Image: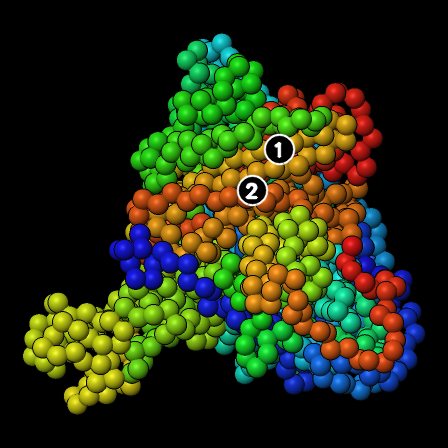
């Protein structure tokens, strides 16, 4: 690729590099404003209860406390004490009922963070316990206590909210029926049915939820660690009843998110605090509070497959139950995506899918990197291996027999598959060949596992705009609103702009989002920034370059064709002309700089499918893992982990492989030890003392990323997105490897030593705190 | 949820003297104040990040007399008479340290929130081991969590920096930066503060 492009495809060092290695990079929590006050949240101590009384006297008496706020204050300052992306079912502060342990009940504002925290601990609430819903099936059953009444649609409303059925504690649902699966099941000899469980898990972005809000005229300026600056501006504009222009949301560097920093309650809470005290307020959560703010859905997933005699899938039925916790959050969107993707990228003539997001009295579950893909792909790929094992088929051969090829329809009407999964799987097999499945001398059991997945990324109507300001010295400022959550978006956009402007990356500066100044971008999610915002920036830079060439051509009295901008000089005409001359020369129409504008609008966001939205592109992924299992202790070591992604064109190998390796490493935790453990409605491990994350010792040194490049992606220079590709298949590959090593099925995550031992020898092992979705 | 300990901690103020990145500070501190709060809120050294708050993640790692400690769980008073080094002290006269250069070259960070802690932990590692092998590096880094990179580029950056150091100062691995200590004759505090476990 390097020959075709000047800077695309090169391992350009990150443009935020120096700031991040010197400690100069500013995150929201590093911001200090004069007169800053601090907010702290008093949270529910019980999972489901009626609030009998709430005494604020002791909290108000703490020196330094300026105000203590409850639901009535939220109603007074806001148009409604309610928010929520799909359905507005979430109170900013609890009204008469709390629905999960940790729900915000009162909000303290004080001169110091310490005083605010101490006062929040003194808010005295008397509760009358209500029945606690912890089981998804029980919550859906007739006669179960109802957690919610009907609520109006939120920012996402519309199609996403149609499945809301509070009568049955259903926040959202998805159903699809293709062909005649019942008849197909009756025709075949082999039918397989398995049920899989994954627990709720925590994003654990290193930076906790944090927001600083300043009163600003009739509205607010908000400094937020958030992936959705424009939707947050819309949300707050609605809550305050002021124009969107009165709300300015700025997002500096974000210390990781992985989906956690979307519709979080800290934004409306901090806005309420700032409105109440008419001063800047910071609300910074502890890690325990972050654990109690959002999670990835735990799920119970049943896959039933009819297999024809030739080893081809004849029909499939999928039933997904997702635990969405106490409030809908993004659950309805997650479960629709999960339902749509659940059959896997295989040829399936007859299909039925039923999927529900169910309310329980647990921490709300929402977006998580691999949004609605990780859970069904885990179940589908385990099911695939179990079928292969039962029929004594090679699991790779079995997949190749059924996989969709490049250009096949996943579903007619959606974008055809633009990733080559069979090629990816063959590459992964080749990577695993050298000796990794050969047992080393010793007692450990060895296994290799594979998993394949495809995620319809960047689906639907997700527009982006960008502005490129070409300065008189040939350098450029890119105004764009992609959130730098670590993925390298600023560097990627700088490379795209530099390529289009014919300049060096060091001549380009890229803004961070500021809804009061930078142009609209739908959101930083769904691996879409490279494709959507990348295209907008490319078009803006090309627009600026075209304007420069046309003006130079006019000045010289020649046609603009054949002129090009290179290193700040328009070349190809009668004489080279500097950008300074173009902008400042006699007769210039430019007001001191050239402003290029670019937009991305999806061509056909709608699709005639049960899901209803057309993929921006398919994020294809193959994971491969080698493991060693100690049969005495049940301990699993991942000895090699390979991810194969499909980049279209790699814009920056350093950051592209970084996304892949990081996603695969994150999945090690998901496969082996991460789980939010509940006892009834109580989350018992909301701390790193009890919740284990992968360390440098858990992730193998042999962590390898391979990227397919066909240059055919819809993004700039043939690129595609990558942020979620590795994570969706690495965990099922690890679990399949462990199952292969021990020769026993595994249907429940994480693979703690106890679970592995249990699977190995069928003995019952006492398992402390075994959480189950 | 009501917190039984809220407001229970009685504190008093105390005068301390500490050297931060070679600069002497005389401060009136609160005895309940953490070293992280002192660095971030009083001295404006916000490069040191706080994440888990329970001495597990390593984001707040700084060097106290050359030893990696978790600033979220070390009291400011423990820095009295001792030298503290933070990420802000790594570059000299605008010149990045070899480790910082290597982190950029290898892509050893993404969101960057864990990076100051890793840089400080790796600084001590390279002061103790001139040319650490993969196993030594990974063991050493167990006290620092990164959720973004998968660790491979961090390990690679440590090796790159080690090679540059040993290459520049001979095979004996000399040329270590000598940490600027307070020279007060106090022993390095060890109780509950040395290392991240």
The earlier-in-sequence mark between 2 and 1 is 1
Check the residue under mark 1 and report the chain it is in.
A
> Element type at marker 2?
loop
> Element type at marker 1?
strand
| Circle count | 2
How many residues crowd around disc 1 within 10 Å: few (fewer than 14), some, or many (20 or more)?
many
Q: Nearer the viewer, residue A253 or A521?
A: A253
> x and y percent of residue A204 in the render?
65, 54
Q: Nearer the viewer, residue B159 or A702?
A: B159
> x and y percent of residue A759 in the render?
71, 24
**Where, by quadrant of the figure, is residue A731 drawn?**
top right
**Where, by quadrant of the figure, is residue A585 drawn?**
bottom left
- Give the side of residue A445 with respect to residue B77, left or right: left
Q: Is residue B31 visible?
A: no
Determine the residue positioned at 68% across, 85% down.
A35
Check the residue under mark 2 and report the chain it is in.
A
- Where is mark 2, residue-wise? A702
Determine the residue positioned at 34% across, 62% down.
A7
- Where is mark 1, residue-wise? A627
Determine the residue positioned at 75% across, 56% down.
B56
**Where, by quadrant of the figure, is residue A225 drawn?**
bottom right
> x and y percent of residue A294 in the render?
65, 53
The CA distance from mark 2 to mark 1 is 11 Å
Q: Nearer the viewer, residue A658 or B11?
A: A658
> x and y percent of residue B137 in the render?
66, 53
Q: How is the image coloured?
A: rainbow
Single out the mark in the foreground, 2 or 1.
2
- Position of the N terminus of chain B, as image quadrant, is bottom right
- Most extreme residue toward the front is B171
- Position of the C terminus of chain B, as image quadrant, is bottom right
């Amino acid at each position: 690729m390097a020959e075709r492009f000047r800077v695309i495809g090169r391992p350009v060092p990150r443009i935020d590099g120096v700031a991040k290695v010197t400690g100069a990079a500013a995150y929201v929590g590093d911001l200090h404003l004069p007169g800053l006050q601090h907010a702290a949240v008093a949270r529910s101590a019980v999972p489901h209860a009626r609030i009998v009384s709430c005494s604020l006297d002791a909290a108000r008496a703490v020196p330094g406390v300026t105000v203590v706020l409850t639901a009535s204050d939220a109603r007074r300052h806001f148009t409604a004490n309610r928010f929520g992306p799909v359905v507005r079912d979430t109170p900013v502060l609890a009204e008469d009922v709390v629905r999960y342990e940790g729900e915000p009940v009162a909000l303290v504002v004080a001169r110091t963070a310490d005083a605010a925290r101490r006062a929040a601990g003194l808010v005295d609430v008397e509760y009358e316990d209500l029945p606690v819903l912890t089981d998804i099936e029980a919550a859906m059953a007739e006669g179960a206590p109802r957690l919610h009444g009907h609520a109006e649609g939120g920012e996402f409303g519309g199609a996403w909210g149609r499945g809301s059925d509070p009568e049955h504690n259903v926040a959202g649902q998805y159903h699809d029926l293709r062909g005649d699966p019942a008849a197909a099941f009756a025709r075949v000899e082999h039918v397989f049915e398995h049920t899989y469980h994954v627990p709720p898990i925590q994003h654990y972005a290193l930076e906790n939820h944090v927001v600083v809000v300043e009163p600003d005229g009739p509205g607010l300026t908000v400094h937020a660690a958030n992936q959705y600056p424009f939707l947050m501006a819309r949300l707050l504009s609605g809550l305050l009843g002021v124009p969107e222009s009165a709300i300015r949301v700025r997002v500096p560097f974000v210390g990781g998110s992985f989906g956690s920093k979307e519709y979080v309650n800290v934004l409306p809470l901090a806005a309420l605090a700032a409105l109440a005290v008419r001063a800047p307020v910071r609300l910074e959560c502890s890690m325990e509070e972050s654990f109690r703010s959002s999670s990835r859905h735990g799920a119970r997933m049943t896959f039933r497959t009819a297999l024809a005699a030739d080893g081809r899938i004849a029909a499939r039925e999928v039933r997904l139950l997702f635990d969405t916790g106490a409030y809908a959050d993004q659950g309805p969107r997650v479960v629709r995506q999960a339902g749509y993707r659940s059959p896997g990228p295989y040829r399936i003539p007859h299909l039925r899918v039923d999927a529900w997001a169910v309310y329980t009295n647990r921490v709300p579950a929402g977006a998580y990197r691999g949004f609605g893909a990780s859970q069904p792909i885990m179940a589908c790929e385990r099911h695939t291996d179990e079928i292969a094992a039962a029929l004594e088929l090679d699991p790779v051969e079995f997949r190749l027999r059924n996989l969709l090829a490049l250009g096949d329809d996943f579903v007619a009407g959606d974008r055809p598959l633009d990733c080559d999964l069979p090629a990816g799987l063959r590459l992964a097999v080749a990577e695993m060949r050298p000796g990794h499945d050969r047992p080393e001398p010793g007692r450990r059991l060895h296994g290799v596992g594979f998993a394949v997945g495809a995620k319809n990324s960047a689906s639907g109507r997700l527009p982006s705009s960008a502005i490129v300001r070409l300065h008189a010295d040939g350098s450029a400022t890119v105004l764009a609103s992609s959130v730098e959550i670590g993925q390298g978006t600023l560097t990627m956009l700088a490379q795209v702009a530099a390529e289009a402007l014919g300049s060096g990356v060091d001549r380009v500066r890229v803004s961070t989002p500021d809804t009061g100044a930078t142009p609209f971008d739908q959101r930083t999610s769904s691996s879409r920034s490279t494709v959507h915002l990348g295209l907008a920036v490319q078009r803006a830079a090309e627009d600026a370059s075209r304007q420069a060439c046309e003006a130079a051509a006019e000045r010289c009295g020649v046609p603009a064709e054949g002129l090009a901008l290179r290193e700040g000089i328009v070349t190809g005409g009668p004489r080279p002309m500097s950008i300074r001359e173009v902008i400042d020369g006699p007769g210039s129409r430019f007001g001191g700089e050239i402003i290029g504008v670019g937009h991305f609008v999806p061509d056909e966001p709608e699709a005639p499918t049960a899901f209803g939205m057309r993929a921006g592109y398919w994020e294809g992924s193959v994971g491969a893992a080698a493991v060693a299992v100690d049969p005495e202790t049940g301990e699993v070591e991942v000895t090699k982990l390979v991810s194969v992604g499909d980049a279209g064109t790699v814009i920056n190998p350093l950051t592209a492989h970084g996304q892949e390796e990081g996603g695969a490493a994150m999945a090690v935790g998901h496969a082996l030890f991460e789980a939010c453990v509940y006892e009834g409605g109580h989350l018992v491990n909301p701390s790193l003392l009890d919740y284990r994350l992968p360390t440098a010792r858990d992730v193998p040194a042999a962590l390898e990323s391979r990227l397919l490049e066909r240059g055919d992606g819809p993004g700039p220079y043939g690129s595609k997105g990558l942020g979620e590709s590795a994570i969706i298949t690495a965990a099922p590959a690890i679990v399949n490897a462990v199952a292969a090593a021990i020769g026993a099925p595994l249907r429940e995550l994480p693979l703690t030593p106890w679970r592995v031992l249990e699977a190995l020898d069928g003995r019952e092992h006492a398992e402390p705190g075994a959480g189950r979705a | 949820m009501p917190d039984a300990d809220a407001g229970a901690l009685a504190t008093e103020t105390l005068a301390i003297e500490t050297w931060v990145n070679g600069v002497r500070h005389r401060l009136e501190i609160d005895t309940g104040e953490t070293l992280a709060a002192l660095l971030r809120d009083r001295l404006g050294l916000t490069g040191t990040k706080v994440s888990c708050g329970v001495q597990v993640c390593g984001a707040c790692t700084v060097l106290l007399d050359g030893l990696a400690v978790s600033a979220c769980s070390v009291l400011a008073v423990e820095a009295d008479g001792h030298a503290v080094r933070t990420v802000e002290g790594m570059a000299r006269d605008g010149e990045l340290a070899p480790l910082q250069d290597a982190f950029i070259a290898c892509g050893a960070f993404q969101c960057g929130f864990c990076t100051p802690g890793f840089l400080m932990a790796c600084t001590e590692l390279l002061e103790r081991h001139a040319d650490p092998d993969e196993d030594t590096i990974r063991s050493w880094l167990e006290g620092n969590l990164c959720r973004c990179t998968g660790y491979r580029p961090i390990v690679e950056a440590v090796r790159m920096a080690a090679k540059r150091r040993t290459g520049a100062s001979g095979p004996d691995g000399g040329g270590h930066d000598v940490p600027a200590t307070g020279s007060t004759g106090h022993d390095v505090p060890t109780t509950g503060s040395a290392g991240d476990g």
